[in-house]
Image (cartoon, rainbow, N blue to C red):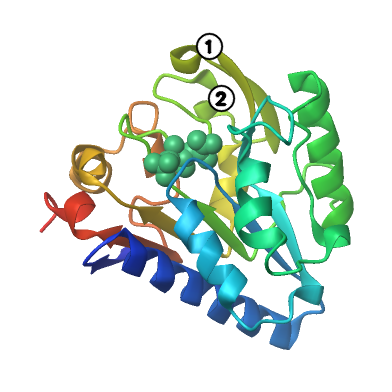
């Protein structure tokens, strides 16, 4: 089954649609299970989506919030993915703090990765070697076709076994912690939100280039992916028709 994609006039309407879908999928998940899990990305595009989530009149008490990736900075830093979600979603939505599973960006990267992996394994009560089925994983795509904190050429793109890793991003001279392909691929739903002209070329390569996730990491799970939906604005979608 092909991934679905929807194109909107601008980033605001793409973000609104993505947020609506998140709410709908969480509602569906909670009809058949006591808790639902949502992993969000960072960067800049999700800000509008977080604001929409915050406005939704939704009962968050049974939703658990995780991150796809985090920069190794304190939670108060302007680059922190946690901070972006906290200011635009967690605080205004009064999201229950006990349900927030942040990546500890202030710790040494390997320690933060281990703690986060332990947190995920405990939440999903995973047996050794099992992979967590997040209800929703929200991801973005970078101008170089990276996704999560998996950048082109990153050896961890071949890792199909581990859940979380610390990764050094040469491009930004920065350590990060990221979910790995096994986890991204096990998500029940993957929502890709991308906006802006600089996403058009990587998007074209990701959706219609040869399958080469080492070169185009955003192809991980999205290439013909079942349960994958792209929310795009017109500038990002301009080359894919
Ligand atoms: C991060 C991310 C990253 C992001 C893309 C797209 O921490 O930077 O989680 O993978 O999704 O870089 O970012 P924008 O949406 O800001 O373009």
Closer to the N terminus: mark 2 or mark 1? 2
> Are the two marked residues, 2 and 1, in contact with CB atoms closer than 8 angstroms?
no
Q: Position of residue 163 (x, y in %)?
A: 70, 38
Q: Position of residue 182 (x, y in %)?
A: 60, 43
Q: In the rendering, which numbered label is found on residue 173?
A: 1
Depicted 110 relative to depicted 63: above or below? above
The N terminus, quarter of image: bottom left
The C terminus, quarter of image: bottom left
Q: Position of residue 176 (x, y in %)?
A: 63, 25
Q: Residue 202 lies in what quarter of the image?
A: top left
Name which residue lies at 71% across and 49% down: 131
Name which residue lies at 66% across and 35% down: 161
The residue closer to the viewer here, 87 or 18, is: 87
Q: Residue 187 lies in what quarter of the image?
A: bottom right
Name which residue lies at 86% across and 40% down: 118
Kindly report the distance in space between the C-alpha atoms of the residues bearing marks 2 and 1. Answer: 17 Å
């Amino acid at each position: 089954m092909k991934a679905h994609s929807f194109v909107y006039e601008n980033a605001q309407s793409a973000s609104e649609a993505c947020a609506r879908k998140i709410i709908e999928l969480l509602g569906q998940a909670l009809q058949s299970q006591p808790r639902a899990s949502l992993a969000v990305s960072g960067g800049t595009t999700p800000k509008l989506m977080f604001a929409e989530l915050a406005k939704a009149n939704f009962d968050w008490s049974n939703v658990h919030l995780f991150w796809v990736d985090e920069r190794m900075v304190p939670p108060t830093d302007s680059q922190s993915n946690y901070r972006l979600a906290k200011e635009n979603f967690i605080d205004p939505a009064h999201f229950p703090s006990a349900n927030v599973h942040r990546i500890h960006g202030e710790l040494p990267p390997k320690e933060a990765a281990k703690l986060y992996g332990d947190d995920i394994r405990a939440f999903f009560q995973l047996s050794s070697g099992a992979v967590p089925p997040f209800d929703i994983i929200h991801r973005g795509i970078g101008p170089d076709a990276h996704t999560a904190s998996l950048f082109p050429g990153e050896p961890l793109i071949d890792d199909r076994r581990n859940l979380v890793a610390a990764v050094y991003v040469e491009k930004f001279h920065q350590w990060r912690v990221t979910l790995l392909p096994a986890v991204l691929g096990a998500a029940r739903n993957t929502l890709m939100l991308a906006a802006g002209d600089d996403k058009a070329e990587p998007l074209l390569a990701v959706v219609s280039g040869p399958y080469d996730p080492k070169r185009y990491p955003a192809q991980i799970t999205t290439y013909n992916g079942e349960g994958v939906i792209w929310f795009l604005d017109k500038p990002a979608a301009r080359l894919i028709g």
